[in-house]
Image (cartoon, grey):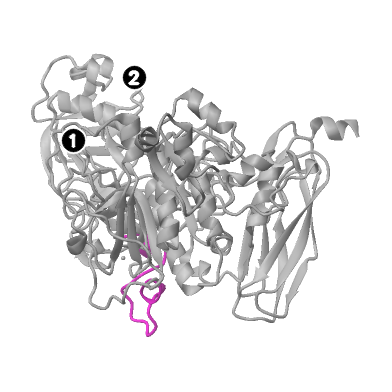
Amino acid sequence: MISSMNFWRFRCSKDDAEQSMLYSYNNGFLGFSAKLNSTQAASLAKLNQVITVFKSKSLKLHTTRSWDFLGLAVDNARRTPPPQLAYGSDIVVGIFDTGLFISLKLLLLSILGIWPESESFRETPEAKPIPSSWNGKCVGGEDFDPSVHCNRKLIGARFYLRGFEETYGTIDFTRDPEYRSPRDYLGHGTHTASTAVGSVVRNVSGFFGLGRGTARGGAPLARLAVFKTCWGKDLEGVCTEADILAAFDDAIHDGVHVISASFGYSPPLSPFFESSADIGAFHAAERGISVVFSTGNDGPDPGVVQNVAPWAVSVAASTVDRSFPTRIVIDGSFTLTGQSLISQEITGTLALATTYFNGGVCKWENWMKKLANETIILCFSTLGPVQFIEEAQAAAIRANALALIFAASPTRQLAEEVDMIPTVRVDILHGTRIRNYLARSPTVPMVKIGPSKTVIGETTAPSVAYFSSRGPSSLSPDILKPDITAPGIGILAAWPPRTPPTLLPGDHRSIEWNFQSGTSMSCPHVAGVMALLQSAHPDWSPSAIRSAIMTTAYTRDTSYDLILSGGSMKSTDPFDIGAGHINPLKAMDPGLVYNTRTDDYVLFMCNIGYTDQEIKSMVLHPEPSTTCLPSHSYRTNADFNYPSITIPSLRLTRTIKRTVSNVGPNKNTVYFVDIIRPVGVEVLIWPRILVFSKCQQEHSYYVTFKPTEIFSGRYVFGEIMWTNGLHRVRSPVVVFLSNAGFLASS
């Protein structure tokens, strides 16, 4: 790629070129971002020295209980410290986010900034010196003084604004409150950073008393580095690719070990060589840096999963076993229970939505200009319909209601949501019972609500969030995405006290801990686990860490049934949860791992039809082997050594290969295979026994798939498990059967 130093030769003058330049990338690869019109970009792309030119796109941002639910407790009586307190001080985790409300042992990269005064980012007295491998720095800015806010926990802080302001203009701080520094306003960066690597904070008061307990990140000893790449625009976090790639470039130079990035964009997805996030993640993986992305919040429809590159981990979102039951008592005797986050008892009259909204449709534009003073309104999502609960809340606020009871399908309700107006969520059954009581009552009923309680262990979990983006991948369907699921619903974590919990105008509450839901919340859970694994196994590659997380995941909930899929009442399949739900303790000792190398990724891109030139735009140091043979064009990647197995189109008998490495504690061990066959597919494995005699020894096995039933197009699922009595190394199997014409003709 042409260097930024020579870019001026293609502009009218050197001064003109310097004014056009946004960033110069020197660590991940040699390149730059600059302001160009379409003619200039086309001319530049024709030069022999230029590998690729693409337009910078904009991407959007996608605890006291969750780590206990994952088995990583910090309060215990064991003689040996738990993994969270034993590992991480030598690791740096980078968070790409909105900044930080400041106060980690790994380096965490935050894309959204941070609120530095938060207890989650304080330097503990026993904190060790900053790792000697760290080359980063803290950059000052508005209300952010490195000498005050950076410490042995928060060891790096940068911000990237040029790409954003070039795309959207100078930030209007009266419309979009922000800090021109690593400091966080939106709260997203502070929340994700504390989830991944926040320090241990005991006796947290929670959200107005709800969710009390000990708050901490997955790797509370880890160091934190903030790379603020996302900025507030109309109360949303927006990140430009020019800024993202600059952050990846610096993160590689600075010496981070894990990168957590909770952003993306909805399909159609750009090719990997035209995506800054995918390019940056590829360069990071080449340097031994693990990268984890969120899958996006476009579910539950299939095929909308984001961030599908095989060199990074993609995370879905699921629930934990905590609930907030809230009693509804009508006329002192008729009692039901909903879910809410209400800290004080509320009493008022009960009314149907038809009293205040045309057709009973709880929407802003349907208000009949009647005030609902001291009234609690019952709204149904099915009337209208009201697709989002926020629509009903805005309507209730406009009518000056005291509170809202919202009846909707339980599969699409998020109980742990912070509301602008007190809102109790009930299912359609309970909503109908309340409605019928109202219809029969000779007088206007009085209703008493709350306060909510915090209950742990009585709710079956996990279940996958309805909004969590599902597979298959629309860019590379022979690689299963998402890879894994992790807690992402009702996550309580640090929050900037100057930022209201809902971000909405009129919300003047100040809090230090807030509930948030999304795949943005599940992503840093996996980043925290990655930090622990990297610290415990410093010789493991990013692919080994990914493999350990995937092959030790589980697929059954606390009732020992299959994990349910939110948005429906069905059991999950690999398109919902990937390999399953993350199990940090098992991942510390997976037994076997599936390793992949840069050459494997190059072959992967060859097989999906990329040209030599396009692949060279991805690779840091292209070797002579970075050349695609003609026979590689548009071939399947079923042989790619991934911890999951996907056959995107099985028509006739097909054999694929996998290779595993022994990373268990015993060099002499024997693994036996067990198979759950997909419906309509015969599965044969050879050899059926793997004998290891030394550590890091590799063995390959072959899997033959043969269709036994005729389908015109259907996904079927199974699994392959290798076990030695101590370890269970499980790989999900996904097969798309499209053999109707083939078997019939044969």
Circle 2 Cα neighbour tier, 10 Å, few/some/many (<14 / 14–19 / ≥20) = few
Quarter placement of the N terminus: top right
Magenta segment, prevailing SS (helix, strand or loop): loop
What whole-number distance in Å separates the C-alpha atoms at marks 2 and 1? 37 Å
The residue where tag 1 is placed is 173
For badge 1, the amino acid type reads Phe
Mark nearer the N terminus (2 vs 1): 1
Is residue 155 visible to us here? yes
Q: Based on the picture, tell me whether residue 81 belongs to the magenta stretch.
A: yes
Q: Position of residue 275 (x, y in %)?
A: 51, 40
Residue 605 quadrant: top right
Q: Based on the picture, tell me whether residue 608 belongs to the magenta stretch.
A: no
The residue where tag 2 is placed is 384
Instruction: Examine the rendered structure and indicate whether residue 677 appears above or below residue 399.
Output: below
Instruction: Examine the rendered structure and indicate whether residue 213 appears above or below residue 508.
Output: below
Q: Position of residue 351 (x, y in %)?
A: 18, 26
Determine whether the residue tagged by mark 2 lies in a helix, strand or loop: loop
Circle 1 Cα neighbour tier, 10 Å, few/some/many (<14 / 14–19 / ≥20) = few
Q: Which mark is residue 600?
A: none
Q: Position of residue 699 (x, y in %)?
A: 74, 68
Residue at x 33%, y 33% (from the top left corner) = 166
Q: Position of residue 263 (x, y in %)?
A: 41, 43
Q: Is residue 562 left or right of residue 496?
A: right
Highlighted range, magenta: 65-87
